[in-house]
Amino acid sequence: MDQEKVIICKNLTKRFGDFTAVNEISFDITKGEIFGFLGANGAGKTTAMRILCGLSFPTSGEATVAGYDVYKQQEQIKKNIGYMSQKFSLYENLTILENIEFFGGVYGLERKEIKRRTEKLIDTLGLQKEAKKMVGELPLGWKQKLAFSVAIFHQPKIVFLDEPTGGVDPVTRRQFWDMIYEAAASGITIFVTTHYMDEAEYCNRISVMVDGKVEALDSPRNLKEKHQVTTMDEVFYLLARGAKRSDN
Amino acid sequence: MKQLLVFIKKEFYHVFRDRRTLLIMFGLPIVQIILFGFALSSEVKNIHLVIADYSKDVKSQKLINKIMTSEYLLVEQVNLNYQEIEQEFKRGEVKGALIIPVNFSSDLLHSGKSQIQVITDGSDPNISKTITNYLTAIIVDFQQQEALSDQVPALLSIQPEVRMLFNEEGNGSLNFIPGVMALILMIICTALTSVSVVKEKEMGTMEVLLVSPFKPVFVLIAKAIPYLLLSLANFTLILLLAVFVLDVEVRGSLLLLYLESTLFIITCLSLGLLISNVTNSQQTALLISLMGMMLPTLIFTGFIMPLENMPKIFQVISNFIPSRWYYLAVKSVMLKGLGFSYVWKETLVLTGMTVGLLSIALKKFKVRL
Ligand SMILES: Nc1ncnc2c1ncn2[C@@H]1O[C@H](COP(=O)(O)OP(=O)(O)O)[C@@H](O)[C@H]1O
Ligand SMILES: [Mg+2]
C-alpha cells in the first residue's frame, strides 16, 4: 500500500464569474510525497489549494483528499489535514505556548497530549527561552517555522503549505525544508506552493501552473531532461513565458 | 465543548492584552457616570427666575424677599402676567417662574392652606429639578417662620404645584443612567464583537480556523460569550457607580434588570456579529457600529431629547432601534420600580429583534471563502 493515493484531482475547475481561476487541473499525489505546486502570482495556486482544504467548492471536476470528497465530505477532510495559509496566521498577541495550546485544542487534542507534544516541539525547535514570549516578537523565520509546526501539530495525513517561505532568508528557508523532510519521513504528505525555483528542486514531484492550467507535472529531474535545461528556473521560464496573468 | 472553552480562553487573552479595548470598555462608563455625577452635584448658581405676584400683600412680599436673598436664584422680574412669563421662557434665559395667586394670603390666613405654582423649563431637567428643590426648601422654611411668628393656625401648609414646561412628563435627569447603560452596552457588544471577528478575517487566522474541524458557528459563539460576560461585568460597574456615586436607587427587581440587560446584550451581540459578517475591515466594522448604532441610540432612545418632542417620522423610526426598547425597560424597572407585567412588551420586541438579527447573522456567516 505504499502507492496509496491521498489526493486525487480530476479536471478540477473554479470560476469566479466569467473568470476561470483554476482550469481543469488533474493530478494524483501519493502518500508521503513532497508535491511542489508551482506557478507565478495569480496562477491559481491558492484557489486550488483552498478547494482541496474544504474552504471553497469547485465549480466542476472531481477531487478527493485523504479519500474524502471535496463536495460532500469537507468535514472529514478537515480532520485529516493541516494548513498553513499564505498570510502569517498565528496570533501575534498570544505567546508561543498559548498558540500551540489553542490550535491543539481546536483540533480536539487532549490536554495531556497537547502538553506532551508541546514539550517535545519546544525542545526540537530550541525555543525554551522564547516559549512565553508573544509570537509577534519573534523574527519572521521563526514565526514561519512555528506556524509549520502548529500546522502539523495534530499529526495530519496531509499538510498544505501556501508559500510558506515567502520573505524568509535563505538559511532559514533551508532549515524550513529540513523540517518539511522530517515531516514527510514521518509519513505526512506535503503539498507546498512556492515560487522559489531552488525550492522546486527539493520536491519529489512538481506541477507547474500557468494561467489556471497545469502545464507540466513530473519530477524536477525529468522536467529538466525533457526541456533540456539544467535548472528548474529555466524550465519554469520556458513554460510560463506565455502567461497572460501576472500581478503587474 | 472542550474546544469551545479553549477558544473562549483565547478570546479573554485577546481582550485583556488589548489595553485600548480594555480602556474603552471600562473607562467609558466610569467617565460618563463621573462626568454626569459632577453635572448633577455641581450646584448651579444664579438661575434666572421670574415671579408673578397676584397677591401683592405683606405675606407674598415676605416670601419674595426670602427668595431674593437666595444666592442660587436670581430673581429678575416681579409682576408679570402669564403670557409674559411664557414669552420669557421661550427666550430661554428664564429657567423658572413662581406664581403667587390672588388669594394666597387670605387662604393662608383663613384655612391655613394655600397654593402657589412653580413652573420650570423642562427641556433642562437638571436645572428644572434644582429650581423645584430650592423653591420647595425656601417655602418650607417660610412656612415654619410664619407658623412661629403668627398667632394664626399652627399648621400652615403651602402647596407648590409644580409644572415642567416643554417636558410635561418630567423626563428627569436620572434618565441619563438607563441611557448610558444602553449606549455603553451597545458600544461594547456591537463594536467590539464585530471588530474582533473582522480582525480574524484581516489577520488570516479566520482561514486557519475554517480549515480546522472546529465548527464555524462555534467561532461566533466563542466570540460572543466573552463579550457577553464582559458586558455583564460592565453593566454591574455602571449599576454600582449609579448607586454609590450618583445615589440612584434601584427601585425594581435586580433580577429582572439583569435579565432585560442580558437580553439587550444578546441583541447587540447579534448585531455585532451581523456587521462582522458583511464587512472585511476593522475600520469599516467600527465605523458602521459607531455611526450606525451609537448615533441612533443617542437620538432615538429619548434620553437626550424627549421623543415626544420629535417629528412624527423620528418617532416611527425609533421603534426599530433596539436600544429604545431597552431604555424603556430599564427606566420602568430601575427608576419606576415596575414589574415584568409592565415591560413584557419591550421584552417581546427585543426578543423578536434578537431572533431576527441572529438568524440573519448566522445565514450571512461565510463558512467558505
Ligand atoms: N474570490 C475571488 N473572486 C474573484 N477572483 C478571485 C478570487 N480569488 C482569487 N481570484 C483570482 O483568481 C486568480 C488566482 O488567484 P490565486 O489562486 O490567489 O493565485 P496564486 O495563489 O497562484 O497567486 C487571481 O487572478 C485572483 O485575482
Ligand atoms: Mg497564492
Image: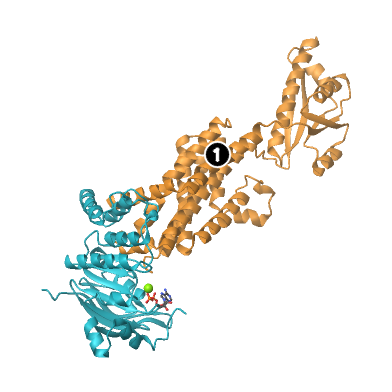
Chain colours: A cyan, B orange
A42 vs B346, left or right, is left
**Which residue is disc 1 drawn over?**
B30
B100 vs B255, left or right, is right
Instruction: Measuring from the top left, give residue A4's x and y in whole percent.
Output: 15, 74
Q: Quadrant of residue B248?
A: top right
The relative height of residue B53 versus residue A168 in the rendered view (above or below) is: above
How many numbered circles does the render carry?
1
Comparing B118 with B345, the one in front is B118
B18 vs B147, left or right, is left
| CA neighbours of label 1 inside 10 A, class few (<14), some (14 to 19), many (20+) | some
A99 vs A29, left or right, is right
Q: Quadrant of residue A89?
A: bottom left
Q: Chain of mark 1?
A: B
Question: At 65% across and 31% down in the image, what residue appears?
Answer: B41
The relative height of residue A180 versus residue B261 in the rendered view (above or below) is: below
- Identify the secondary structure beneath mark 1: helix
Instruction: Measuring from the top left, give residue A18's x and y in whole percent.
Output: 43, 83
Comparing B161 with B309, the one in front is B309
Instruction: Tell me if I can see residue A142 in this picture.
Output: yes
The amino acid type, in three-letter code, at marker 1 is Ile
Instruction: Measuring from the top left, give residue B129's x and y in whole percent.
Output: 69, 33
Instruction: Measuring from the top left, give residue A9's x and y in whole percent.
Output: 25, 79
Question: At 83% across and 40% down in the image, what residue appears?
Answer: B88
Q: In the picture, which quadrant includes the C terminus of chain B?
A: bottom left
Comparing A209 with B40, the one in front is A209
Q: Quadrant of residue B331?
A: top right
CB at disc 1 and ligand 1 closer than 8 Å = no
Furthest residue in direction top, as rendered: B151
Question: At 42% across and 86% down in the image, what residue appears?
Answer: A244
Instruction: Tell me if I can see residue B156 in this picture.
Output: no
